[in-house]
Image: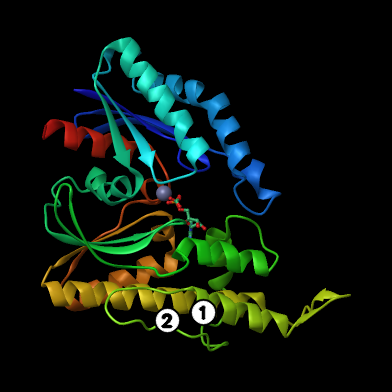
Amino acid sequence: MLTLGIETSCDETAAAVLRDEKVLSSIVSSQIDIHKKYGGVVPELASREHLKNLMPIIREALSAASVSLNDINLIAVTYTPGLIGALLVGVSAAKAIAYAQGIPFIGVHHGEGHILAAHIEYPGIGYPYIALLVSGGHTALYHVKGLGEYLLLGQTRDDAAGEAYDKVAKLMGLEYPGGPVLDKLAREGDPRAVKFPRGHLEGYDFSFSGLKTAVRNHIALFMSKDKGIDPKLNVRDVAASFQAAVVDTLVEKTMQAAAETGVDKIVVAGGVAANSLLRKRMDEEATKRGITLYLPGMFYCIDNAAMIALAGYLHYKRG
Ligand code: KG4
Ligand code: ZN
């Protein structure tokens, strides 16, 4: 069975072809260069870019998989959450193709796609597991009991972790998206240089807005109206200290969830799962506790259509 997956929820136009659960092709076209100069994604520009790029990307995915549209048996597309205009482009295209080809159409939740991305590289993973979903739009912990059975243990009460990265980078005058830039700077900084607060909430909820404010207050000490940012501000140390605070909280709550549910498998998913410190710390802590950690490769952490196709296919197969 061949599934065509489509993803247009934010600033990546993506299409993928799967044969059953196997990825034959996965094409991602990023719009980052277009949005960079505005310091974030401009929704209307994103929709227009998707409109322009989606059909060529679908053709590229089909050709890379050496199949034609007539071979496709199922269309899966991200229908929520995301930028409404951007989603609309993908959903409309998917519905039109499904209707014209006379094949089934299935809408996929973007967050579920991110979680199931782990199954692409680890097909034998099985259930249950704890999933930490950390992206630009989500920060949540789930007890995944089976396909479609996601018990929400906790989530952020304000900013998502990726959003905090992007906003802090903006405060520091760095490029969008802030995650990869701060991650790189942090590697050369001292994580103990600035004592930023860890958002300690009861249970499994997260909070990053206090941390963001603390970074803003710290930077303000080095800012003047006429001269801008004082070069004495050590951006590497700030990046490293901020990153340590984010990662500490994410790792601590995830390990706590595994311990309290008695689940011995953890999946980390979403764009922030590409973070080098988060990957390292999760790995260390999981090993210490005898927990198996499933970290998707970078390509399947960021937005892509293979994860959407897989989620759609698995639901379809189950009826
Ligand atoms: O999953 P994703 O591609 O899109 C959403 O569904 O949001 O995640 C994008 C987010 C952005 O906020 C970006 O800054 C963050 O993931 N990100 C990172 C890293 N790479 C991407 N955050 C921290 N460290 C990284 N290396
Ligand atoms: Zn995403």
Q: How many C-alpha atoms fall within 10 Å of the one at disc 1: few (<14), some, or many (≥20)?
A: some
Who is closer to the viewer here, 111 or 273?
111
Q: Quadrant of the N terminus?
A: top left
Query: Which residue is tagged 2?
Result: 199
Q: Amino acid at mark 2?
A: Gly
Which of the marked residues, 1 or 2, is nearer the chain's N terminus?
A: 2
Residue 25 percent coordinates (x, y): 35, 29
Tell me the quarter of the image containing the C terminus. Answer: top left
Q: Give the residue at mark 1.
A: 210
Contact, CB < 8 Å: mark 1 with mark 2?
yes
Q: Position of residue 278 (x, y in %)?
A: 39, 68
Q: Secondary structure at mark 1?
A: helix
Q: Is residue 303 above or below residue 271?
A: above
Which quadrant of the structure image shows residue 218? bottom right
Q: Quadrant of residue 249?
A: bottom left
Front residue of 29/145: it is 145
Q: In whole angstroms, how far apart are the C-alphas of marks 1 and 2? A: 7 Å
Q: Residue at x 18, y 37 (%)?
A: 314
Tag 2, which secondary structure?
loop
In the image, taking residue 28 as reference, residue 220 lies left or right, namely right
Picture coordinates of residue 203 (x, y %)?
Answer: 27, 78
* 47 in relation to 221, above or below: above
Q: Is residue 28 visible?
A: no
* Three-letter amino acid code of the residue under disc 1: Gly
Q: Is residue 8 above or below residue 53?
A: below
Q: Name the outermost residue toward the right.
A: 226
- Label 2 CB sits under 8 Å from any ligand 1 atom: no
